[in-house]
Amino acid sequence: MKITKTKLEGVLVFEPVVLDDRRGWFIESYSQTTLKALGVEVVFVQDNHSLSTERGTLRGLHYQLHPKAQVKLVRCTNGAIFDVAVDIRKGSPSYGKWLGIELSAENKKQLYIPKGFAHGFLTLTDNVEVQYKVDTEYAWNFDRGIRWDDPTINIKWPIHNEPIVSDKDQKAPLLKDAEHNFVFGK
Ligand SMILES: Cc1cn([C@H]2C[C@H](O)[C@@H](COP(=O)(O)OP(=O)(O)O[C@H]3O[C@@H](C)C(=O)[C@@H](O)[C@H]3O)O2)c(=O)[nH]c1=O
């Protein structure tokens, strides 16, 4: 597993070693021991899997509040996504800044997102399957959103038309109207 730091402190890109042979390929998509040896200590308790049938579908930006804040390890196992993390840790030098990376079934990259970040993705193909591990269970009453098109954050989504967005996400507040709630813990 190769681990690369990003411009946002704590957000990491994981690239598994791909072992090819006559039959195809093999990867260790997750190894707690390997990550621990590389300095990443986390215990994941839930795996999530979503299908987005149409290209141009946007899910996010989502986060859970303390004490249900989540670390996420995201990968795309069919198709491709533009995956985004936004730093919403109060006092962080990169507060409000975002990072976008293409994750695809082909490149097998994974994005490691600590607590204190909002997360979202845009599908770049049809029939996108995204799978991600979280270290804290889903809790609907701690689940929160920020608008994907918040002009203060100004994410450069690689899209020309309006994306397909859930009603919940379309009604999400702007960063400035949500930030009084931001508490995430360690
Ligand atoms: C996230 C989640 C949702 N649900 C339910 C709630 C709802 O009925 C249905 C769909 O939920 P949502 O519309 O929130 O699904 P979705 O928009 O795919 O939510 C996900 O988006 C990405 C960007 C993330 O970062 C995730 O943490 C998660 O928030 O699934 C669970 O039962 N468990 C879960 O862990």
Image (spheres, rainbow, N blue to C red):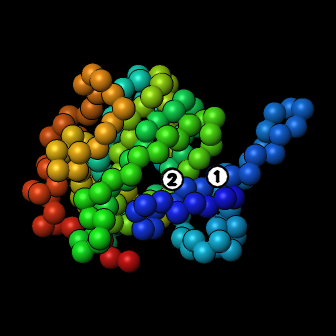
Q: Are marks 2 and 1 in contact (CB under 8 Å)?
A: no
Quadrant placement of the N terminus? bottom right
Give the residue pinned by disc 1. Answer: 15
Q: Which mark is residue 101?
A: none
Give the residue pinned by disc 2. Answer: 111
Q: Residue at x 35, y 45 (%)?
A: 120
Give the image quarter of residue 166: top left
- Look at label 2 and name its amino acid: Leu
- Relative to 53, is 77 above or below? below
Q: Nearer the viewer, residue 159 or 20?
A: 159
The image position of residue 119, as x and y in percent, is 36, 51
- Element type at marker 1? strand
Relative horizontal placement of residue 17, taking residue 169 as reference (left or right): right
The image position of residue 118, as x and y in percent, is 32, 55
- Relative to 100, is 6 above or below? below
Q: Residue at x 14, y 40 (%)?
A: 171
Give the image quarter of residue 184: bottom left
- Relative to 87, is 152 above or below? above
The image position of residue 151, as x and y in percent, is 16, 44
Relative horizontal placement of residue 93, taking residue 167 as reference (left or right): right
Rounded to the nearest angstrom, the CA distance separating label 2 from label 1 is: 9 Å
Q: Residue at x 27, y 32 (%)?
A: 165
- Element type at marker 2? strand
- Look at label 1 and name its amino acid: Glu
Which residue is most to the left?
A: 177
Please say whether residue 47 is visible from this viewpoint. Answer: no
Numbered disc total: 2
Q: Residue at x 36, y 32 (%)?
A: 158
Please say whether residue 116 is visible from this viewpoint. Answer: yes
